[in-house]
């Protein structure tokens, strides 16, 4: 017997827990949508990807889009507006000769079904050009058309996507972003699922209740600040600013929220307004506003070690996350100062500097010099380490530093506590037979394995035409490979790759940037892998 959708199922995609006046109306539409989906002749195709529960969620998801348009909550319309700014059209994939902004459209429903299929499950990638998607979208659209004239506005829902223009409390703004990322129908099918998986892993690993609570809160705060959605690869703050609109008084402030720094700091004193702290790994100094930190009265001894999360909001650093303190600990300090990851957590503070771009340019010149003027090198995996060492040696020699200057640089690093890391010989031959080294002009040296057959280039002796399609898809889809390497493949090799000249591969090229943003959720926006040592106040 067909399972009915109940109010509990419907509310799972809502930013509120208690039923609103209009929810009964939309629940009926949910069940109508589910009925036409499961009764459609193409439902058997859908059932190969989705189970009964997923079909219920899909029905709620599509109906939430309908409710969003009716209630003018500006969720879907924000996606359309940003896509249009980026690509000069409202949506990818579909013919848009008859498309009406701020109304319901068949193309919207088709896109949403495709997006849902490739988000709720990731075992198989489903191309958007499948007939079963458009056919199911048509019957769902019939349901929406019949209800278009009578559907009520959900004022309660609309209130959750509004915020006072004069709001100055970062925590209110943070909760607003959290709501958009993890409690909004368009994103939560992806983001909330990922968050729950992270939380389950924390709960399963940690046995102490106090530790679990700390880690869960820290993880949630970090996710609000750093999560990118598969749709257009945007952060929560970017969606929040778009939903509010350019004319809203908080839009620019929300966009300017900094990356979150989470780590160990020295307590260095305080005044009436701020607590003075110093990031142990990088020696960078920060003024933490007391408005955000309730524990300043308990801090007495200088160089007490604090674990904190901090975020810059309206030109002030706010405490964000969980905190604890501990006495001076030389071993922890040494570990932090020699931790590449801990130092890298503040890299973004220097990336506006021209010196970051200058350093990347110098590294590129060294790479070209060590690789016969080419931006990409192909080799057996066992040779990758020696290639990288040779490149580093060429780069160091290009600096043309005297022994005296080298010693001074080492002393500066040592004074700051950085002694370097000892690395043994690494054998990559058990990872793959082949590898490549690519210089990413945005981030620096990049290594990739087992994708050489995506590059039919004269300096690549490892290209195998039989393996090319599989290698191409790995380059395009893998979140471990940068968008820049994917574009290098397309720009330099597509004419010699049959995959891109016919069929689905040719279709992918029409919306390739959209796809790369979707596939490379964590690696689309490459950043310079450059860390600077030394004090600086923020």
Image (cartoon, rainbow, N blue to C red):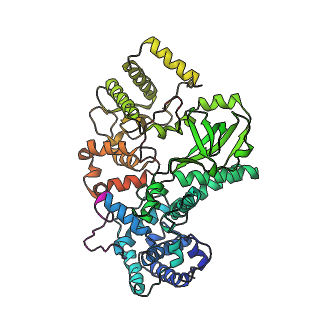
Tell me: 275 left or right of 360.
right
Q: Is residue 503 above or below residue 412?
A: below
Is most of the magenta stretch helix, strand or loop? loop
- Residue in view at x 54 percent, y 30 percent: 535
Residue 272 at x, y = what percent? 65, 45
Q: Quadrant of residue 65?
A: bottom left
Does the stretch in magenta take in 91?
A: yes
Q: Which residues fall within the magenta stretch?
A: 86-103
Tell me: 218 left or right of 413.
right
**Pick the front one: 188 or 168:** 168
Tell me: 80 left or right of 228.
left
Residue 531 at x, y = what percent? 49, 32
Q: Can residue 230 be seen at all in this image of the molecule?
A: no
Q: Is residue 506 above or below residue 529?
A: below
Residue 247 at x, y = what percent? 40, 64
Furthest residue in direction top, as rendered: 403
- Residue in view at x 41 percent, y 39 percent: 352
Q: Is residue 381 above or below residue 464?
A: above
């Amino acid at each position: 017997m067909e399972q009915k959708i109940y109010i509990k199922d419907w509310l799972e995609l809502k930013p509120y827990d208690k039923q609103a006046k209009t929810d009964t109306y939309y629940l009926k539409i949910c069940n109508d949508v589910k009925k036409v989906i499961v009764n459609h002749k193409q439902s058997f195709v859908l059932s190969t990807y989705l189970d009964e529960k997923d079909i219920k969620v899909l029905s709620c998801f599509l109906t939430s889009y309908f409710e969003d348009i009716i209630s003018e909550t500006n969720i879907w319309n924000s996606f359309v507006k940003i896509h249009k700014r980026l690509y000069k059209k409202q949506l990818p994939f579909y013919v848009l000769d008859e498309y009406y902004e701020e109304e319901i459209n068949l193309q919207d429903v088709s896109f949403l079904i495709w997006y849902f299929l490739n988000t709720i499950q990731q075992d198989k990638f489903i191309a958007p050009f499948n007939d079963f998607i458009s056919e199911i979208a048509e019957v769902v659209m019939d349901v929406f058309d019949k209800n278009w004239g009578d559907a009520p506005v959900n004022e309660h829902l609309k209130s959750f996507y509004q915020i006072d223009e004069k709001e100055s409390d970062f925590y209110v703004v943070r909760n607003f972003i959290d709501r958009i990322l993890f409690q909004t129908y368009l994103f939560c099918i992806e983001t909330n699922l990922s968050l729950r998986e992270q939380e389950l892993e924390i709960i399963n690993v940690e046995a102490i209740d106090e530790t679990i609570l700390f880690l869960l809160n820290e993880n949630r705060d970090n996710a609000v600040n750093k999560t990118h959605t598969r749709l257009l690869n945007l952060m929560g703050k970017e969606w929040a600013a778009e939903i509010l609109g350019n004319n809203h008084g908080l839009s620019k402030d929300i966009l300017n929220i900094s990356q979150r720094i989470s780590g160990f700091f020295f307590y260095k004193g305080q005044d009436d307004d701020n607590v003075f702290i110093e990031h142990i790994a990088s020696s960078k100094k920060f003024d933490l506003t007391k408005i955000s930190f309730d524990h300043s009265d308990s801090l007495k001894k200088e160089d007490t070690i604090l674990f904190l999360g901090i975020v810059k909001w309206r030109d002030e650093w706010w405490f964000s996350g969980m905190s604890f303190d501990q006495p001076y600990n030389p071993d922890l300090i040494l570990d932090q100062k020699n931790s590449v990851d801990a130092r890298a957590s503040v890299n973004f503070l220097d990336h506006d500097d021209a010196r970051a771009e200058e350093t990347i340019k110098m590294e590129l010149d060294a790479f070209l010099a060590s690789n016969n003027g080419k931006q990409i090198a192909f080799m057996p995996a066992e040779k990758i380490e020696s290639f990288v060492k040779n490149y580093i040696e060429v780069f160091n020699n290009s600096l043309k530093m005297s022994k005296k200057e080298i010693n001074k640089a080492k002393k500066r690093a040592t004074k700051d506590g950085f002694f370097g890391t000892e690395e043994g010989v690494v054998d990559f031959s058990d990872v793959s037979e082949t590898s490549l080294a690519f210089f990413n002009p945005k981030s620096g040296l990049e290594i990739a394995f087992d994708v050489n057959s995506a590059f039919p280039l004269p300096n690549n002796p490892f290209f195998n035409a039989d393996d090319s399609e599989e290698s191409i898809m790995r380059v395009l889809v893998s979140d471990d490979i940068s968008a820049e390497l994917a574009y290098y493949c397309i720009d330099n090799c597509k004419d010699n790759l049959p995959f891109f000249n016919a069929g689905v591969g040719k279709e992918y090229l029409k919306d390739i940037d959209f796809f790369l943003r979707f596939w490379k959720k964590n690696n689309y926006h490459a950043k310079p892998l450059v860390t600077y040592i030394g004090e600086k106040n923020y």
